[in-house]
Amino acid sequence: MTDITLQNFEADLLQASMQQPVLLDIWAPWCGPCRTLGPMLEKLEVAYAGRWKLAKLNSDDQPEIATQLSQAFGVRSIPFCVMFIGGQPVDGFVGAIPEAQIREFLDRHVPTGEALEAEEDLAEAQALMEDGDAEGALQKLQAAVMADPNNEIARFDLIKALLEDDQLEHAKAAFAPVAHQAADTITPHARFQALAAWIAAAERAEQGLDPAALQSAIATNKRDFDARFALAQGLFAGRDFTGAMDELLEILMRDKTWNDQLARKTYVAILEILTKPAVPAHAGATPAAGAGLQLSGHNTVAPNDPLVDQYRRKLSMALF
């Protein structure tokens, strides 16, 4: 349990919530219900075994923070509890509600033990990848998905690792539970759509492609888009991502809408494969001098990849 002040608000609440959910209990010494709720929350923090963290804020000592949170949620009384996740206040409740209701509230926001286990496996997998241990990383990714099948990052990394290891059938099996998300025409999952395109390229390559024959066909007819797309798929399957995008650009510069924009969609899929996701800001970060109180934490965007930026510009030039 941590007491929150203006001095540690950023580090011990906002940035700490980047690592795990933090429940802020806003109380006052004169508040009777607060004295009932406080010990109950402390007991639950222990019962949940580190899956969330309790922070407390004395509204008499820290009126600026208490007032801003009360105004943000339209609340005028205490005890008032606010859940912070990812540097943001996401939900709350008012009053000394029964323990069963508090547990219901926590269970909506706090990761399960399986989810935490998956996160640990995923972190270990990423460290192994950086060390060049692809086999060890693959085993950890498989463990992460088994522990928490809903962990999208772990599943994406697992399918990607399987495709990189030319294990197409295993990649397809790992992709099957999320295939509907990639195929959704209203809110498709961009990263899973990218994997679907990679799997399609790998399946086409597995059927057999003759690069020399395809290049000969293209030399004879620059607008033989079927041959050029097949060549791009072979390059995509072989992880020559820039080579594949170069071939797709040739199609786009001649016919932007060819085959229901298949060249553009595949090009975008490759960019998605190559783009690293954003990561949370370091938990020890502090606000700039004079910045004042902020109720939201700071996210760190993924560092720019010059290659990805270059090919995004090429796509933009081809389309517009």
Image (spheres, rainbow, N blue to C red):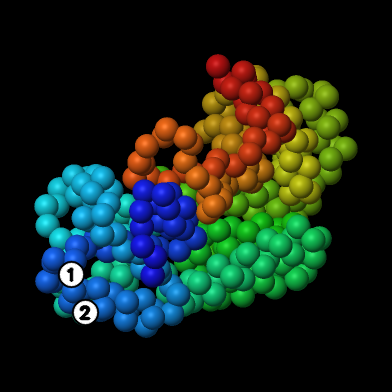
Mark nearer the N terminus (2 vs 1) = 1
Instruction: Please state the horizontal and vertical placement of residue 303, each as a whole percent of the image.
Output: 63, 39
Residue 100 drawn above or below residue 66: below
Question: Which quarter of the rendered picture does the N terminus lie within?
Answer: bottom left
Instruction: Please state the horizontal and vertical placement of residue 44, each as a whole percent of the image.
Output: 32, 79
Nearer to us: label 2 or label 1? 1
Secondary element type, mark 1: helix
* Residue found at x 60% / y 52%: 195
What residue did someone put label 1 on?
34
Instruction: Please state the horizontal and vertical placement of residue 53, each as a whole percent of the image.
Output: 40, 68
Residue 312 drawn above or below residue 111: above
* Residue found at x 37% / y 83%: 47
Q: Quadrant of residue 211?
A: top right
Residue 260 drawn above or below residue 60: above
Graded by Cα atoms within 10 Å as few (under 14), some (14 to 19) or many (20 or more), the crowding at tag 2 reads few
What residue did someone put label 2 on?
99
The three-letter code of the residue at mark 1 reads Cys
Graded by Cα atoms within 10 Å as few (under 14), some (14 to 19) or many (20 or more), the crowding at tag 1 reads many
Q: Is residue 196 visible?
A: yes
Q: CA distance from mark 2 to mark 1?
A: 14 Å
